[in-house]
């Protein structure tokens, strides 16, 4: 395993910890309203913030704003990295079957079975009738089926389908994308400028047309109206880097990106300020001038790219060696992502009556969620259902003629 691959595996562990921390502190943002969001009233903002606690700290607003800018884009980038090698190894048919089983099936199970349990405390926070039967009636009356943070998975699955289609019907495109990433090792600024330029074209017009914060839901599918094309850009940016080779291009452990981590840290802070200043002028509910909205959109794509680059650079520079705890976290990251939200919401709800400051509550929620989701993921890895999924995976590979040995499973992306 190369140093770049180890660093990316460690980054996968870091990302899941950040995801858990991000969701753990949402109940304690200083910008939240005084009362919880009503369960039955549009625009159903409880989907993003299920529990509203009276204890607040502005530092959590800064942390969540910074992570909201770049964290999901980084996850799409990481997910695209290993797609080219998987497609070359498996072919489009087997790859799609693998993705449907790896992403589609857990998505259906968790959204269908776990999300109603997850959001029951959200209903209890404002309910006149706390009975389970009443909750179920209110749940079924919603004009959508809440999916929580798993919106990421259905968008990722759609991008995987698109990548498989391109591999099948336009195979030369993979090599073309790889050539675009060829100069990343020595000249990461060129890649940065290209990424910012393309993502600006994908994001800014939609952010001007819709509010940057506006979501829409249809059935179990939710997405932020301004960002689908932006996330596609990051997925295929990762695809391009992976097509050229992890150790040859932008993510080489001895490349310019890793060596200049301090400069990228400064760039990420500057980018955040460039986004935060104009964005703060758009949060009072009044229509902001077009120039302010444009500055906010441009600031977003700059801050997003810089935030992604600094996390990549830090892991390449300081985490290119294996560590047991990071290996374990990385191995269970996907299952933890699937399971963590139910623990977060119930812990936040349980702490509502507790007289404790915001940072203390957030620490309990984060620590409890980390332990519980990690333990649940480890238990799931050894239970019967997991065994059946592995058997089904082997059968699908065999049925599509995959020559790889049935016992060999490689990490293909963030969900692998």
Image (cartoon, rainbow, N blue to C red):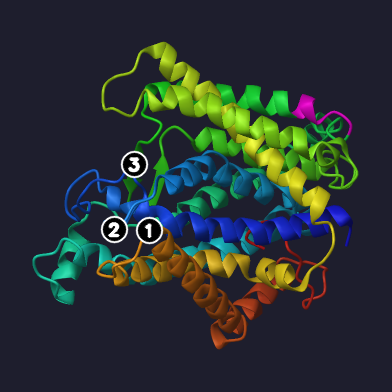
Q: Nearer the viewer, residue 215 or 386?
A: 215
**Residue that label 2 marks:** 53
Q: Report helix, strand or loop for mark 3.
A: strand
Vertical order, 129 against 249 (above or below): below
Q: Is residue 140 left or right of residue 185?
A: left
Query: Gap in Å between the C-alphas at discs 2 and 3?
Result: 25 Å
Nearer the observer: mark 1 or 3; the answer is 1
Q: Magenta segment, which residues?
A: 186-191
Query: Gap in Å between the C-alphas at discs 1 and 3?
Result: 30 Å
The location of residue 325, given as percent across then percent down, is 71, 72
Q: Is residue 13 left or right of residue 157?
A: right
The location of residue 16, given as percent across then percent down, is 59, 60
Quarter where residue 411 is shown: bottom right
Question: On the rendered image, what quadrant is the N terminus found in?
Answer: bottom right
Query: Gap in Å between the C-alphas at discs 1 and 2?
Result: 8 Å
Q: Report helix, strand or loop for mark 1.
A: helix
Quarter where residue 329 is shown: bottom right
**Residue that label 1 marks:** 358
Q: Residue at x 39, y 53 (%)?
A: 26
**Residue that label 3 marks:** 216
C-beta proximity under 8 Å, tags 2 and 3? no
Q: Residue at x 42, y 64 (%)?
A: 360
* Dot 1 or dot 2, earlier in sequence: 2
Q: Residue at x 44, y 60 (%)?
A: 24
Vertical order, 402 against 233 (above or below): below
Vertical order, 113 against 70 (above or below): below
Q: Could you tell me if residue 237 is visible in this image?
A: yes
* Dot 2 or dot 3, earlier in sequence: 2
C-beta proximity under 8 Å, tags 1 and 2? yes
């Amino acid at each position: 395993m190369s140093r770049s691959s180890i660093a990316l595996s460690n980054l996968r562990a870091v990302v899941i910890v950040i995801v858990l921390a991000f969701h753990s502190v949402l109940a304690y943002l200083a910008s939240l309203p005084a009362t919880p969001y009503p369960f039955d009233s549009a625009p159903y903002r409880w989907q993003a913030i299920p529990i509203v606690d009276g204890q607040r700290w502005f530092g959590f607003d800064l942390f969540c704003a910074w992570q909201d800018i770049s964290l999901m884009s980084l996850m799409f980038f990481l997910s695209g990295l290993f797609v080219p090698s998987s497609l070359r190894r498996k072919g489009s048919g087997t790859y799609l079957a693998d993705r449907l089983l790896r992403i589609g099936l857990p998505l259906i199970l968790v959204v269908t079975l776990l999300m109603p349990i997850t959001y029951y405390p959200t209903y209890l926070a404002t309910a006149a009738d706390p009975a389970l039967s009443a909750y179920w009636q209110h749940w079924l009356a919603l004009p959508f089926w809440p999916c929580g943070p798993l919106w990421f998975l259905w968008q990722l699955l759609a991008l995987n389908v698109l990548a498989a289609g391109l591999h099948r019907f336009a195979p030369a495109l993979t090599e073309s994308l790889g050539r675009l990433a060829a100069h990343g090792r020595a000249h990461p600024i060129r890649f940065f400028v290209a990424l910012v330029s393309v993502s600006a074209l994908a994001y800014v017009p939609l952010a001007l047309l819709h509010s940057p914060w506006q979501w829409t839901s249809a059935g179990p599918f939710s997405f932020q109206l301004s960002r689908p094309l932006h996330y596609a850009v990051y997925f295929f940016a990762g695809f391009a880097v992976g097509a050229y080779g992890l150790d040859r291009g932008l993510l080489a452990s001895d490349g310019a990106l890793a060596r200049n981590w301090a400069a990228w840290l400064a760039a990420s802070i500057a980018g955040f300020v460039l986004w935060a200043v104009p964005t703060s002028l758009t949060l009072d509910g009044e229509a902001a001038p077009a120039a302010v909205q444009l500055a906010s959109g441009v600031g977003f794509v700059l801050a997003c790219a810089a935030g992604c680059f600094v996390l990549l650079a830090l892991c390449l520079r300081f985490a290119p060696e294996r560590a047991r705890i990071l290996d374990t976290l990385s191995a269970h990251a996907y299952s933890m992502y699937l399971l963590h939200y139910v623990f977060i919401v119930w812990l936040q709800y349980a702490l509502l009556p507790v007289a404790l400051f915001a940072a203390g509550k957030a620490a309990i929620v984060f620590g409890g969620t980390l332990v519980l989701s990690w333990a649940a993921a480890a238990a799931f890895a050894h239970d019967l259902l997991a065994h059946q999924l592995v058997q089904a995976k082997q059968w699908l590979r065999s049925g599509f003629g995959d020559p790889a040995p049935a016992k060999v499973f490689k990490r293909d992306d963030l969900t692998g």
